[in-house]
Amino acid sequence: MAIIRKADSADIALLLEGTYPYISGGVSSWVHQMVTAFPEYRYAIVFIGSNPDEYGQPRYQMPDNVVHLETHFLHEKHGESETKPRKGDPQTMQTVRELHDWFRSGSTEGGDAVFKALASMLLDSKDVGEAEFLYAKTSWEYICQQYRERCTDPSFVDYFWTVRSMHEPLWTLARVTQNLIPVRLFHTVSTGYAGYLGALLKNKRLKPLLTSEHGIYTKERKIDLFQSNWVRDNRDAFQKHASELSYFRSLWIRFFQGLGLACYDASDKIVALYENNRLRQVEDGAPTERTLNIPNGIKLTRFAPIRPNRDDSPKSPPILCLLGRVVPIKDIKTFIRGMRTVANELPNAEGWIVGPDNEDPAYAQECRDLVESLGLSNNVKFLGFQKPEDIFPKVKLLILSSISEALPLSLLEGYAAGIPAVTTDVGSCSQLIYGLTDEDKALGPSGEVVPIANPEALGRACLRLLSHFDVWQACQAAAVARVERFYTDDLMFGRYRTLYQELLGEAATPDTTDTETVA
Amino acid sequence: MAGIGFELRKLLNKKGYLGLLQGYFYAGLISSGPWVLSILGVLLIGFFSIAVVVPDFLIAQFQVTVTYIMAVSLILTGFIQLGFTRFIADRLFEHKDYIVLANFNGVLLAVTLAAGLLGGLSALFLFPEESVLYRLLLAGSFVVMSDIWIAAIFLSGMKRYKAIVLLFFLGYSITVAAALLMRPFGLEGLMGGFFIGQSVLLWGMVALVLYEFPGADFVRFDWLEVRKVYPSLIWTGFFYNLAAWADKFIFWYYPYTSNQVIGPLRASEIYDFPIFLAYLSIIPGMAVFLVRMETDFVEYYEKFYNAVREGETLQYIEEMRNEMVATIRQGIAEIVKIQGIAILLVFALGPILLDALHISRLHLPLLYVDVVSAGLQVVFLGLLNVFFYLDRRRIVLMLTGLLVVSNVLFTSISLYLGAAFYGYGFAAAMLLTVTVAMLVLDRKLETLEYETFMLQ
């Protein structure tokens, strides 16, 4: 643990797992936007990372109202408790058993009582809880028993270490709650370890907890776990079935679900970026009445001035643009294949791929080779990183071929600049193209949504828009109206200001923006 | 004696009783060969010198001198015996064979200096009445014998068990022959023969080492690190050897049970002879111990740790643990059985044996109890071996420490209680230590998986 900025107290503690200010990305930008937008609040940031050597210097210039910053690393060697045998307390194990049963039940009912018991076990000052978990005979017996009852993978040593590495961070987090400076509100920007920390803090400090989720942590972890080879399972060819998830993987998933449940249970308000995610949260155990949507917003003033510079006519060159890093999750290859379909009918069509390609060089090369082999060298261009302002005036369609997205700001930025979009059906895309509420839907579609990994459909959708100028114009108008009505940063800040004031028990200042609470 | 298991298993897997017999014979030879040869050698020299070396008293002086050389050299090298064994094993495991020889030279150099200093000072100040030649031979033999223990440890670390036995056989044959040839020169003649024979043994071993293990550097002192890495081994080796000799020293220096033999060296006629005889009775026990430990036990020991490492199920790990426990139990039971038979044989044949050797039957009760003690010592060795395999070094240290303390204590009590109790001190100390060792082992095995996973 390290304290980078120090204060005696703060208004809001942001609990950030692997993001701001050390890692740049969507969530970090959002956090930066937030702390900058609320100079009236003094923020404390609790940064949770995995290994200290994975993070360098802060990537953001933090504003002065971030008065406190402390970092904690989950996989740092910690624990002052000495390696020595101990009997262990049967009562403690009983509580652990109840807690696990509760996690397994997946309901938020009765969580309070078990959780309080757990918190008190974790939070004693002498690290007894940790020593108990690491060295006690009772804990050993419990692990063996759980293995016998539940584990369907053979390797005991892997089970044992999975359980250990899964639980050890909990004590690091418990220690955070002892030393954190006093604040009035906890705001976690994910579930997972940060959300769980929020639950512990709420429990100990009795201050409100606000949870904002950009992605769905549990779901992202699930993708990680499916893709990674780091979870060994030691099944042989006969035991392994392609569709069958290894027990260790499912253990991790359930563990994160448990953390998520604890977080939802303790949260006063649970914010999702868009409707699909909110439904997902409810499915994962979030009490409906505490959930709401607050979509991200963009600064209109930056993009609106682009519109007059546009040259929109049926004759203007059909330029399609994919804004994003050249990585598999963006499924650049589907866009390239789709460009073949487009180019077949519009030989002068251009597909611009705008974004850094150094993150996954092998994938970037594959993409270039694909362009070559499809004979699209004259149509598809890799432009690297560009300022949106420089390219937007020429772009007629914004393309998003990703297999996973949350609420892509680039889409909104394109809208503001007067560019309709064709996207895959992921995250909030459908909501952004067709509208969410009746009022929103009445604006009409601002583009088209196609299934993922379907280049033909993507290409066809682009052609529909590019070869019918009237349709394109209608979409453009809807895009501009939609972003101005529902997705400006002022709207977002307004809603968060209301939330903050409500949770901090302050008198709400008159607010002109309508708070869209979905109950 | 790690690594011997493979050869033993090969012999035991042969069909019929012949293979079994060969296996146990081989095990007996390897486990007992060197010290049996030492005892027999010294006894033979004495036996054939009667009526040639006059007066008889000179023979006793020779035997007592050699006994002291043996005892003190073992205790002195005890500090480094186990640590050096472990050092060799670790380096071989890391495939750093090339630095092993240089370290052997380093240990040899250090032991030579230490033994030279101790032997030299003793010869200089403790034997003013004896001839210069005796004193030189005493110091020289002490250094040579200390070096022999180191060379033997090195060779057994390198798994050259057969070579050790052969070299001991050769060395003691020459020792006996040379001593007998030089009998006419009295005590100095016997000592001279002994020194020559031992030197041949030492140089034979050193030659074998140099021939088989060429090394780049000549002398290295990496082995000194064992002081830091395995401090407990330093004291364990010392305690074990000290414990094995403590009761003897007490009897040698207790006025009523001993008499002065040469210089400051004293002997206990009543105590010494039965104990050396008793040690010969443990040959079968040692053979069984080696066979059981290095074949069955090691097999399941390896299966257990492989099961842990390579991701077997908990059920399988527990099964292997249980098999391991069963082999330990079986091994100890067999040692007890075979030593039981040995004890019965000594009880039955003791009187005849003593008569044949022209030794007073007054030694008989002491012989009986010594045979029991020696048998217990084999069991103790077996238990220590298990602890070493499980790498519970602190327990071994505690047990050998307990043996030192209890042997000193109980032996002193037996002296106080009178002649009828002689020998019971050592026996009681062995019994206590073996009992404690068994209880501790029981508990350790009970919680083996817990400790393996949670505490390491």
Image (cartoon, rainbow, N blue to C red):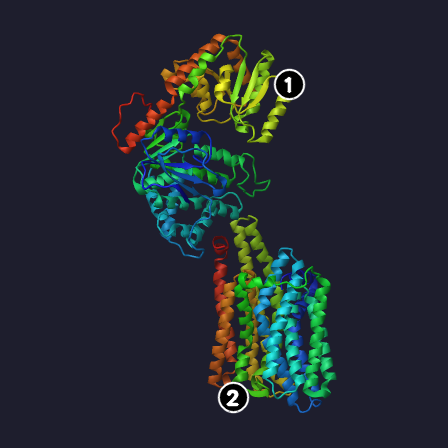
Q: Where does the image place residue A230, in percent across and percent down from the top left?
A: 54, 40
Which residue reaches farthest bottom?
B55
**Front-lying residue, A27 or B248:** A27
Badge number at residue B392: none
Q: Tally the numbered discs.
A: 2
Query: Are tags 1 and 2 found on a single chain?
Result: no
Category of crowding for the residue at label 1, using alpha-carbon neighbours closer than 10 angstroms: few (below 14), some (14–19), many (at least 20): few
Quadrant of the drawing holding the N terminus of chain A? top left
Instruction: Inspect the image, locate mark 2, and give the three-letter code of the amino acid beneath it.
Output: Tyr
Give the spatial CA distance, label 1 vs label 2. Answer: 110 Å
Badge number at residue B256: 2
Residue carrying label 1: A375
Foreground tag (1 vs 2):
1
The chain letter under disc 1 is A
Q: Is residue A257 left or right of residue B303?
A: left
The chain letter under disc 2 is B
Instruction: Inspect the image, locate mark 1, and give the three-letter code of the amino acid beneath it.
Output: Gly
Q: Is residue A299 left or right of residue B205?
A: left
